[in-house]
Image (spheres, rainbow, N blue to C red):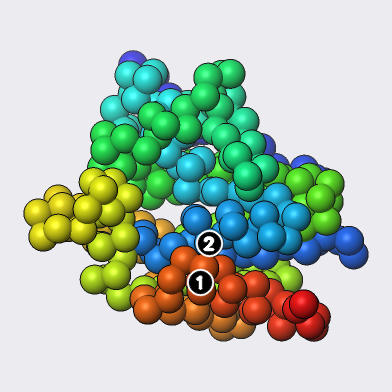
C-alpha cells in the first residue's frame, strides 16, 4: 500500500506583500467573547476600510471538510481539502460574507456543530499555513483598494501581519466573555445559558492557544480591556488607539 504524499503549500505570491505607502493595516487579536469581531467590523466601517474575519475562514474550512465527509482528525486529508477549498471572503464591513463554491455559508458556520469542532481544523499546522497565506493576500489586495483594512483573529498581530501599522489585543474577563457569548448564542446570560456556553469559549481558547498566542500581548501590541466597556466604548477605544498609532488627531 503506497503512502499518501505530504500536502505541499504554494509559495507566497507577490500579492502577499502587504505593506505599502498607501495601505494601513490594523491587526486585532483576542480570545472568544472579547468583542474583537463586532468591534473590528464597526471600526472598519467608521474608517472606510475593508474588514477581514479570519476566524470565519477556519469555520469555513471546518464546514467544507465536514461536507466532504472527512474525519477532522486526519490532518493530511484535511489539509489537502483546505488547499483546494474554493473560498471567497466578502470584506465589506457593513455586510461581510463567506462563500464556498458559490454557496453563502455565513449562517451555517456559526452553528454549534462547527463551533465545537473548529479547533480540530484550526490547530492543523498545514491548514494554518494555507489560510495565513490567503489572509495576507486578502489584506494586501483589499487594503490597497480601499486604503486600509482591519483584520481580526488570534494570530494577526504576531504571525499574519506582525508589521501592521496598528496592532491591538482585545481582552476581557472570563465572566464578561462568557456573558457576551451566551447572550449572542442563546439570547440570555442566565446561569444555565452561561454553563452551556462555557465549553465552547474556554475549551476553544485553550485548544487554540497551543498554536497561537492571543491571551497576552506580544511586544509592541497594545492591550485594550473591554470587560467594563460598552460596545460603543470599545469601538471608541480602538479608534483612539488607531489614531494615536498613526499620529493623527481624531475629530
**Which residue is rendered at x = 55% and y = 27% of the image?**
99
Q: Kindly give the residue lying farthest to the left in the view shown.
A: 192
Q: Kindly give the residue lying farthest to the right in the view shown.
A: 21
| Residue picked out by circle 2 | 39
Q: Is residue 93 above or below residue 103?
A: below
Identify the disc placed on residue 234: 1
Cα–Cα span, label 2 and label 1: 7 Å
Residue 109 locus on image (x, y percent) = 40, 34
Crowdedness of circle 1 by 10 Å Cα count: few (<14), some, many (20+)? many
Image quarter where the N terminus lies is top left
Left or right: where 146 falls relative to 139: right
Q: Is residue 188 above or below residue 173?
A: above
Crowdedness of circle 2 by 10 Å Cα count: few (<14), some, many (20+)? many
Depth check, front residue: 173 or 251: 251
Q: Is residue 59 above or below residue 51?
A: above
Image quarter where the C terminus lies is bottom right
Marks 2 and 1 in Cβ contact (< 8 Å): yes
Mark 2: secondary structure = helix
**Which residue is rendered at x = 50% and y = 80% of the image?**
223
Q: Earlier in the sequence, mark 2 or mark 1?
A: 2
Left or right: where 235 falls relative to 17: left
**Which residue is rendered at x = 53% and y = 48% of the image?**
54
Res. 5 visible in picture: no
Residue 180 locus on image (x, y percent) = 31, 60
Mark 1: secondary structure = helix
Amino acid at each position: 500500500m503506497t503512502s499518501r504524499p505530504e500536502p505541499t503549500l504554494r509559495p507566497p505570491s507577490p500579492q502577499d506583500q502587504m505593506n505599502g505607502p498607501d495601505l494601513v493595516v490594523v491587526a486585532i487579536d483576542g480570545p472568544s467573547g472579547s468583542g474583537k469581531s463586532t468591534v473590528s467590523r464597526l471600526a472598519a466601517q467608521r474608517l472606510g476600510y475593508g474588514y477581514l474575519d479570519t476566524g470565519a475562514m477556519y469555520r469555513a474550512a471546518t464546514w467544507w471538510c465536514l461536507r466532504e465527509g472527512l474525519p477532522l482528525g486526519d490532518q493530511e486529508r484535511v489539509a489537502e481539502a483546505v488547499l483546494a477549498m474554493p473560498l471567497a471572503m466578502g470584506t465589506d464591513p457593513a455586510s461581510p460574507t463567506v462563500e464556498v463554491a458559490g454557496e453563502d455559508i455565513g449562517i451555517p458556520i456559526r452553528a454549534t456543530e462547527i463551533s465545537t469542532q473548529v479547533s480540530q481544523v484550526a490547530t492543523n499546522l498545514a491548514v494554518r499555513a494555507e489560510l495565513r497565506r490567503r489572509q495576507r493576500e486578502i489584506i494586501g489586495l483589499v487594503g490597497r483598494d480601499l486604503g486600509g483594512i482591519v483584520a481580526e483573529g488570534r494570530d494577526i498581530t504576531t504571525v499574519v501581519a506582525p508589521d501592521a501599522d496598528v496592532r491591538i489585543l482585545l481582552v476581557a474577563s472570563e465572566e464578561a466573555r462568557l456573558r457576551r457569548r451566551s447572550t449572542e448564542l442563546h439570547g440570555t446570560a442566565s446561569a444555565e445559558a452561561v454553563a452551556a456556553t462555557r465549553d465552547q469559549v474556554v475549551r476553544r481558547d485553550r485548544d487554540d492557544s497551543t498554536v497561537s498566542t492571543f491571551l497576552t500581548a506580544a511586544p509592541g501590541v497594545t492591550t485594550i480591556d473591554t470587560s467594563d466597556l460598552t460596545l460603543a466604548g470599545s469601538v471608541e477605544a480602538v479608534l483612539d488607539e488607531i489614531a494615536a498609532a498613526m499620529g493623527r488627531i481624531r475629530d
